[in-house]
Every structure is written in structure tokens, then in C-alpha cells.
Image (cartoon, grey):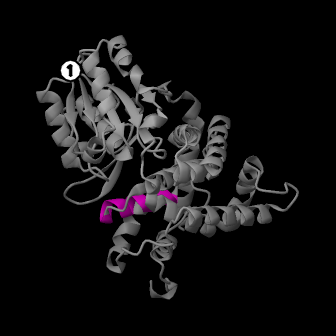
Amino acid sequence: MNPFYKLYARTYQIIFRIALPILPYRDPIIFNHIEDISGIIKENKKNKPMIVTDSGILSVGLCDDLFNRLNDSNIPYSLFSDVCPNPTSDVVNNALKQFKEDKCDCLIALGGGSVMDTAKALGALCARPKKKLSDLAGILHVRKKIPTLIAIPTTCGTGSETTLAAVITDSETRHKYAINDFPLIPSYAVLDCKLIKNLPSKLVSTTGLDALTHAIEAYLGRSTTKKTRADALEAMDLIFKNIEDATNNHTDESLQNMLLASHKAGRAFSKSYVGYVHAIAHTLGGKYNVPHGYANAVILPHVLKEYGKKIYKKVAKIYDYIGLGDKNVSKEEKYNVFMARLTELCDALNIDKHIDCIKEEDIDQMVKYALHEANPLYPVPVMWDKKQMKKMFYIVKGTNYDTTRD
């Protein structure tokens, strides 16, 4: 990597780290039961929420309890259920049109990361009506209060109910970009395990590993604080201890613990950011509609392996915290045991080793997108240049990368 660019990137990250204590981060107010929704709306003196969700959630009845609570409280609402995986700018603009036509004054996002991204992006357009969505991409471009947003996760992985980010795919270019600003943090979050009781096992596992990726990348990065490190470690411990039971048995305790882990991981990465796993996963989601949680689950072991000895020290601390074995062994041995446990977990959850839909002719463009997202913002433990990022795309694809060709 060009040493001058590396210096610029690391300086950029240091400035953000120094600024962390004075930035207006906040945590949403947490409720554990969907029955609390009506009270939240009335307390905030709102009259008509828009419920943002997707057709799958609607079809399996996960919205029914919410509808009943609002109807019993005589609270009218507007329903927008056209959210798609990797939500597009067209979807957000359609939601905005309905929000205005139905004269809504607040938002309820019931769903996974795509639903919450859509609701946040909609809120951003409400706050900045003269801007296009793409104008708000990047950092701190919203800067105005969005309508009150109540986030209700129906997966155990995104942590989006506590983050300041919305990730949107441009409908024309298929480029995936993030909108990052403090007003996007939801005002309230409802963590109710009964909403994920009937979640398909595959979604429990992949969204749970998405949360694990959030926690690991936040912890390994170079912009951590005492609080984000604590949240990340607690999230990792909860996930390693509960994800298999949650996936296979759907017990209330394990599912509630996964929701809590996802929330803690979200708090960690919203302040300490993520890393190259996410940059690659976002690019694959934008290009091929690869589900985000699944992409992270596949990519995570490959990226950690590539980091190698640069992360031995921090991985050793993770090993100690989650209790993987003898604390007196070397940092390298702890890293090896952790990697073996991660691989074992992915195998037990039937996670693929590679993503084979990647087309070789698309890789150069995807490398550009991934690096543009990650550098200089993400405080990764090791900075990669174009050649290193290209190598990783080939590794994720499951084919060899001939470095002599470039």
C-alpha cells in the first residue's frame, strides 16, 4: 500500500477515535414486549405511524400482534410492505411517497436489517426533503432530526436498531452505499423473542453470525473504547454460547440472548465501525443480492485468516473472555484455537465455505467499491490495497489468485 495514503487513512481514523467521546451517540430506549408500542406512540404524541416491513414478515403473521395492539388503542397506521433484500433507492422513494400521502408522523420498522435500513433512509429523506438519497451517502450528511423511529428486530443479527447507518443499493447502478448520521439511530427498540420464535433456522444462524461479525470487527479495529470492547466481548460470548441452541431448538432463553447479543454488537460497531468483511459483503449484496448475514458468515473466517499474526493479541483476549481453553498458552495458539472453534461453529451451522456466484469479470469493479467503502473510514487492523483486496475476492470465490497477472 502507498505509505502516504496509509498515513492519511490512519490519521483520519485517529481523528475519529479522538472525537468519539464528544460525538452525539445515543442508545435507543429498550422495551422487551411488543405490547409496549401503543404507549410509546401516545407518550410521544404521535397520531399515525407508518409500519415498514416486508412481504415475507407480513405473510407469516409477524405483524398481526402489532396490528392488534394499534387497533385496540385506536391508533391508525399506514402499512408499507414492499421492502426487498438489499433495499434500493426506488423502494425508499416509494415509501416516502406513501408516507406523505397517508400523512404519517412516525415510523415503526418491523423486520431485519433491510427493513430498518429502508425506514432510516425514509426518515433521512423526510428530514432533508430537498435532497436525493444519494446526496446523503457518506458521513454526517443528514444532520436533522428524522421522524420518531421505533425499531423492532425480527432477526437476531443486524443490530440495526441501535446503529446510525442505513445501507442502500442504487436502483440504476447497483452500487451499494451507506448513509451514516446520528439522527438515524432509532429512538426506541423492542427486543421481543416471540417475534423470532418461528424464524427459519437458516436465518437464525446467518443473522446470528452477522452479529458475531459485527462484534469481532468492532473489537479488532483500532478505534475501540472501553465500552465498545465490553459490548463486543459480551456479544461474542452470548453468541458462541447460544447460537446453536437458538438455531436448532428455538428456546426462549437462547433467542432472547441472541437478540441481546445482536443489540450489544450493534452498539459496539456503531461507534467502532466494522471492517473488510462488511465491505466485501456489501459489495456482493449490491452486485448479486447475496444476503448480508450469509455473506458475512462465509467471508469472516477468510478475512481473519488473512489478517494472521496482526490480530493474535486481540484474538487471544477474545479466547480468554469466552473461555476456549488454557489461558497460559501462547497468543498464536489461542488464535489457532479460536479459528478452529469459529470454523467448527460455521460447519455445525451448515455455512458454505465459498460464494460461487462471483464472476471473475466483475471482480475489478467490486474491488473498487469495497475499497471505497472501507478506506479510509474503517479502522481495520491491517490495511489492504487493490491487490490484497482482489486476492480476497478470489479466496471468497474459492479459486486461486495469480498475483503475477496484475
Assess disc 1: are there few (<14), some (14-19) or many (≥20) residues with their C-alpha within 10 Å of its C-alpha.
few
Image quarter for residue 57? top left
Report how many numbered discs are placed on residues in the image.
1
Residue at the image point whose x is 65% and y is 48% from the top: 241
Q: Is residue 202 above or below residue 89?
A: below
Give the labeled residue for mark 1: 76
Q: Quadrant of the N terminus?
A: bottom right
Percent across and percent down for residue 89 are 22, 48
Magenta portion: prevailing SS class: helix
Callout 1, which amino acid?
A: Pro
Residue at the image point whose x is 62% and y is 68% from the top: 305
246, 227: nearer the viewer: 246
Percent across and percent down for residue 77 are 21, 25
Residue at the image point whose x is 58% and y is 67% from the top: 347
Q: Element under label 1? A: loop
Q: What's the magenta region?
A: 276-288
23, 41: nearer the viewer: 41
Magenta highlight on residue 282 = yes
Image quarter for residue 188? top left
286, 131: nearer the viewer: 286
Q: Is residue 1 above or below residue 378?
A: below
Residue at the image point whose x is 28% and y is 17% from the top: 72
